[in-house]
Amino acid sequence: MSLPKGFREAFSDGAYLTLGFDGCIWVFPMGEWARRSEEVKSRPLSDTQGRALGRLFFGNAETVELDSQGRLLVPQRLRTQAGIEREAVAVGVDDHLEIWDGDAWKRYEEIHEVAYRAGTLGE
């Protein structure tokens, strides 16, 4: 997947990809991956949900490098898990990037767009 030019510098040292929530793939710059990893690891082993989060977060993680043309190779395993078939969409979300199947992103936007435009999303 070719990254928009504005994102390439943030991922110039490489990136970690993992299965995200809501059917996307999360792409973290190396420094942000370290911070997010600590967040996940901070959950106690005695916490069932924390163990599940850690297993899925780390168990689906892959490290990738950008090629000379600013592209990153999204492993087939993650594309399959996220349901990415033809068109992929990159969405910048504050400290990370999300990769969505094009149709799935359109559906997600349609579901949340009215509340967002009305200023009621998150209330």
Image (cartoon, grey):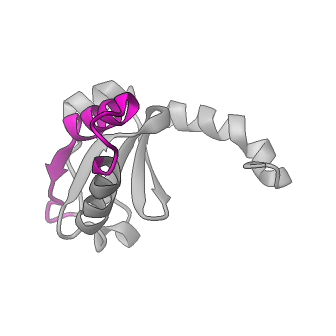
**57 vs 39, nearest the viewer:** 39
Q: Look at the image and tell me whether residue 85 can be seen.
A: no
At 40% from the left and 55% from the top, the residue drawn is 97
Q: Nearer the viewer, residue 123 or 93?
A: 123
Task: Locate residue 93, reporting x and y percent.
Answer: 49, 58
Q: Residue at x 29, y 74 (%)?
A: 9
Residue 49 in the magenta stretch? The answer is yes
Image quadrant assignment for residue 43: top left
- At 29% from the left edge and 42% from the top edge, which residue is drawn? 18
Give how far across and how far down residue 48 sits, in percent. Answer: 36, 28
Relative height, residue 56 to residue 58 (above, below): above
Q: Residue furthest front?
A: 46
- From the viewer's perspective, tell me whether residue 49 is left or right of residue 79: right
Residue 87, image quadrant: top left
In this rendering, does residue 75 appear at all?
yes
Q: Is residue 56 magenta?
A: yes
The percent position of residue 38, horizontal first and vertical second, equals 28, 57
Is residue 50 placed above or below 92 in the rendered structure? above
In this rendering, would 77 be left or right of 21? left
Query: The magenta stretch spans which residues?
Result: 41-69
